[in-house]
Amino acid sequence: MRPLRIIGTILVLLTFLTISGCDENIFSDYSDDTSDEAQMEQALMYLDDGNYAAAKAILLTLNQNDEEVKRALASSYAGTAGLDIPSLITAIDNSSNNGIETVGLVLGDSNNDLTSAEVSSKTSDIEEAISLYEGLTLTDSVKAQLCILHVTRTVLVLAERVGTTQGWPVSLDSGIATVVSGNFDATSVTKINNSVDTLNSYIDSIDDLSGGGSSLREGFDDFLTDIGYSGGITDVEIADFVNGT
């Protein structure tokens, strides 16, 4: 399996395992909620309509320690970045099982292109969503959501490095520019390692959503072998992975 294809495989399996294992829209957990709280109910209606900015504006005024508020707020941040299940399904249908291309179809424009400002704002939104989900009770569903968010953040980190060193906009598709090891600063390497560690920790729990019938762990272990993972990844290994070497 080509290195980039494993990202697509992981993303496809996570998306559909989460949908099949939960009676919920992964990034709109409360679209059918019947909360008695007027403000929360209005925020949920905005989430259901895809008006993430309006939902976020309300949710930020509510109790930030409440798990329901955190989950809804995380959904609004992910949605603001352009990450939602309908978009993911459409992207999966129109991509070649290439994880970078799949994320590009979700987050980019009609050409899968992202500008520097877009990468910055979307990364910020995704990281806010990650932070909120990490503060929730870590059910299998929450872990699945975190995995999808971390895959997305990793692609955005790669896009930022390519754009900064080789020019904007960046096209997130199978022909993404060659990445060299010197392009990665310490912050980028740390973020990618954090995301890989999270995926490695939660993959087995995600398998529970399908009743233990998926090959997600096997595929991810192959990915770890491909990148030479041994408790951490260097900038050279990241570059080799993206370049398919």
Image (tube, helix red, strand yellow):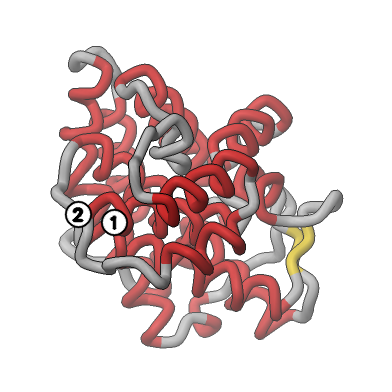
The residue labelled by disc 1 is: 133
Residue shown at 41%/24% (left/top)? 19
Q: Is residue 236 above or below residue 154?
A: below
Q: Nearer the viewer, residue 60 or 236?
A: 60
Q: Which amino acid does label 1 sit on?
A: Tyr
Residue 164 lies, with reference to residue 18, above or below; the image says below
Q: How crowded is mark 1: few (under 14 residues within 10 Å), some or many (20 or more)?
A: many
Question: Can residue 245 be spotted in the picture?
Answer: no
Q: Residue at x 33, y 51 (%)?
A: 71
Label 2 neighbour load within 10 Å: few <14, some 14-19, many 20+: some
Q: Eyeballing the image, is 62 above or below 2?
A: below
Could you tell whether 189 is left or right of 51 in the image?
Answer: left
Between 238 and 28, which is closer to the camera in this rendering? 28
Dot 2: element: loop
Give SS at disc 1: helix
* Camera-side residue of 63 and 200: 63
To which quarter of the image does residue 63 belong? Answer: bottom left
Residue in the picture at 77% in, 53% down = 112
Q: Mark 2 points at which residue?
A: 136
- The total of numbered circles placed on residues is 2
| Percent coordinates x, y for residue 165 in the rendering | 67, 84
Q: Residue 125: where, in percent of width, then height?
A: 50, 68
Left/right of residue 32 with respect to residue 167 in the rendered view = left
CA–CA distance between discs 2 and 1? 5 Å
Q: What residue is rendered at 32% in x and 24% in y?
A: 22
Q: Position of residue 98 (x, y in %)?
A: 60, 39
Does the image show residue 68?
A: yes
Q: What residue type is labelled 2?
A: Leu
Q: Do the residues labelled 2 and 1 touch (CB within 8 Å)?
A: yes
Q: Position of residue 130 (x, y in %)?
A: 35, 62
